[in-house]
Amino acid sequence: MANVLFFLVSRPRFVNAIDDAYFNEASAIDHIDIGLLGYFRQLKDAGIKIAFDTGYPENIQQGLIKRLGFDKVADAYISSYQVTEGRPYPYMIHHLMEQTKVMNVKRVCKVGDSVRDIQEGRNAGCGLVVGVLSGADSFQELMNAGAHMVCERVTDIPVPQRQPTLGNQRLPDFS
């Protein structure tokens, strides 16, 4: 989701401005990459869980999730309004891990387009923190914040192959 910065605008005016920009009938809001939903489906097919966090209020996040069709691919999402502190604190990531039943933070890839996104991922201890150049921050700023790598678009991140699982099978006892 895009980060928007407004100066000297009161909270109600900010929320109204976002509502107007994103949700009126003339809004041109769209995916940052035409193949984004297909990419998310590939991730899901590979067994990857998809979760979103944002600094927007819950109603705006829910509206964006629905408008962009992310409700069809998201396993979970959270707003900074649902935790005690937003980015760069790690709390949204930790709550999303709990919701998606991901136990090991080293298996989490945090992707973001701002320095605060990168800081959030590093503070959470994510195994991979990826910056994307769809936001206001530059390659160098994202790297300086601690990104492990920076991509032009989120869809440039390779989709991992699905790992076979043993399921209910047991390994033989060789003792």
Image (cartoon, rainbow, N blue to C red):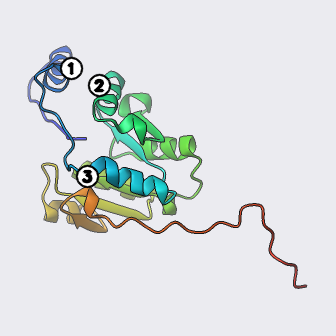
Number of numbered callouts drawn: 3
Separation of disc 1 and disc 2 at Cα? 8 Å
Q: What number is the disc on residue 15?
A: 1
Residue hosting label 3:
35
**120 w.r.t. 131: above or below:** above
Q: Position of residue 58 (x, y in %)?
A: 36, 25
- Mark 3 or mark 2: which comes first in sequence? 3
Q: Where is residue 7 in the image (x, y as percent from the top left)?
A: 8, 29
Q: What number is the disc on residue 54?
A: none
Residue at 37%, 33% (x, y): give it.
Answer: 80
Using residue 121 as the reference point, say whether residue 98 is left or right of it.
right
| Amino acid, disc 3 | Gly
Circle 2 packing at 10 Å, graded few (<14), some (14-19), many (20+), is some
Secondary structure at numbered mark 3: loop
Residue hosting label 2:
60
| Amino acid, disc 1 | Val
Answer yes or no: is residue 123 visible.
Answer: no
**47 w.r.t. 23: above or below:** below
Q: Where is residue 57 in the image (x, y as percent from the top left)?
A: 32, 26
The quarter of the picture where residue 43 lies is: bottom left
Tag 1–tag 2 contact (CB < 8 Å) = yes
Residue at 23%, 65% (x, y): give it.
Answer: 150
Secondary structure at numbered mark 2: helix
| Amino acid, disc 2 | Ile
- Mark 1 or mark 2: which comes first in sequence? 1
Using residue 59 as the reference point, say whether residue 45 is left or right of it.
right
From the image, state whether disc 1 or disc 2 is nearer to you: 2
Q: Position of residue 116 (x, y in %)?
A: 26, 49
